[in-house]
Image (tube, rainbow, N blue to C red):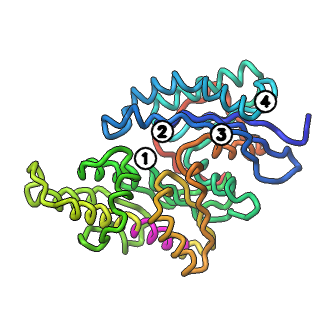
């Protein structure tokens, strides 16, 4: 048995089929796992015509893609199945059918190879991606902010395996709001990159849009009212009217104003959580963290108040299997799953330990 261990990670929580091979030191060795390989099969093309993820289509695509992705990850890492020491899989939160595909593949491999199975929380993985991206810096303890298509949540993270949820969205997640507003504006899917594209160079103060909970003590988010305000700005008091009241420049200004409203809330709530906790580090994960305006504003906030900001490269912000490297510290802590483990579709509020 060598001084390091190899882990195969599988990710099928939503609409990306991903696999990765991670290598990390065995106890008593210390250090951040390294990514031997990471591959992702996107389903964007399958869901674009619907303007959002269709669960049944996502599940069927995972069935087709999960084994080829595993094979590709192993090949790129230059290892075989018999070289693996453990299997990791994201089991929560996500789409039930999608989660089941990944878990079934992971269980089958763990049973056939007689190696441990480690269940991973998708959101904790997004935050651990910060440590993967900055292996030479101390990320924990920190405030964690996950901003994605399905989740907008704040956490206190005293360590990779010690997270406590501080607050989350009461309705739409930030990424979901981007997708829905992009649809209202007649833009493509996914909405985040499309809104960022048309907002570039436009006036973010052109429309006075709401910023829910901005000055509330609660560390929660709400974007449904913002989405409704965009609808009225487009169509006037008669929101059902097919007539759009804005020209192309106006649409760009509205996109910029919407984007700025979302970013204002995300930055303000992150700052509020940092102030309340006294922590001086912020880790950010999730697909919305790829937005350049958000990255610019959150970095400026960190500089202004003396807080270290950790945002992974875009490849580790969007859904991927490499972030399931958090399974290695779980493995060494003895947090191994039984083969009768099931998926959990909804958000689980992680507690310490």
Q: Earlier in the sequence, mark 2 or mark 1?
A: 2
Instruction: Tell me how far mark 2 sits from mark 1, CA to CA.
Output: 8 Å
Badge 2 is on which residue?
94
Badge 3 is on which residue?
38
Q: Tell me the crowding category of disc 3: few under 14, some 14 to 19, or many 20 or more residues within 10 angstroms, Cα based.
A: many
**Circle 1/circle 4 CB separation < 8 Å:** no
Badge 4 is on which residue?
79
Q: Position of residue 139 (x, y in %)?
A: 68, 63
Q: Is residue 237 above or below residue 45?
A: below
Badge 1 is on which residue?
150
Instruction: Residue 164: name its quadrant.
Output: bottom right
Q: Position of residue 47 (x, y in %)?
A: 37, 34
Magenta range is: 264-274
The reply to whether residue 344 is in sight is no
The residue sitting at 49% across, 51% down in the picture is 287
Q: Earlier in the sequence, mark 4 or mark 2?
A: 4
Question: Which structural element holds mark 1?
Answer: loop
């Amino acid at each position: 048995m060598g001084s390091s261990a190899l882990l195969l990670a599988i990710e099928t929580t939503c609409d990306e089929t991903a696999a990765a091979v991670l290598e990390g030191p065995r106890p008593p060795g210390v250090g951040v796992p390294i990514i031997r390989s990471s591959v992702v099969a996107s389903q964007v093309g399958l869901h674009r015509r619907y303007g959002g993820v269709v669960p049944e289509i996502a599940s069927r695509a995972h069935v087709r893609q999960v084994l080829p992705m595993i094979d590709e990850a192993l090949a790129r890492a230059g290892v075989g199945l018999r070289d693996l020491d453990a299997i990791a899989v994201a089991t929560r939160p996500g789409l039930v059918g999608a989660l089941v595909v990944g878990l079934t593949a992971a269980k089958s491999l763990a049973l056939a190879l007689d190696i441990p199975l480690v269940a991973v929380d998708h959101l904790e993985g997004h935050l651990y991606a910060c440590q993967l991206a900055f292996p030479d810096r101390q990320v924990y303890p920190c405030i964690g902010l996950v901003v994605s298509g399905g989740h907008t949540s704040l956490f206190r993270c005293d360590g990779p395996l010690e997270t406590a949820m501080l607050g989350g969205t009461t309705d739409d997640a930030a990424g979901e709001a981007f997708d829905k507003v992009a649809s209202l504006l007649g833009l493509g899917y996914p909405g985040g990159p499309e809104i960022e594209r048309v907002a570039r160079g436009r006036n973010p103060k052109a429309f006075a849009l709401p910023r829910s909970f901005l000055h509330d003590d609660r560390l929660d988010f709400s974007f449904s009212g913002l989405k409704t305000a965009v609808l009225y700005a487009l169509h006037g008091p008669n929101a059902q009217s097919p007539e759009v009241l804005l020209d192309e420049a106006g649409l760009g200004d509205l996109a910029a104003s919407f984007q700025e409203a979302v970013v204002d809330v995300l930055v303000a709530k992150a700052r509020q959580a940092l102030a309340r906790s006294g922590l001086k580090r912020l880790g950010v994960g999730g697909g919305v963290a790829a937005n350049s305006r958000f990255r610019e504003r959150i970095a400026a906030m960190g500089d202004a108040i003396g807080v270290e900001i950790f945002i992974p490269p875009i490849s580790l912000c969007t859904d991927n299997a490499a972030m399931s490297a958090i399974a290695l510290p779980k493995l060494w802590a003895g947090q191994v799953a039984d083969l009768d483990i099931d998926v959990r579709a909804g958000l689980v509020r992680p507690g310490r330990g």
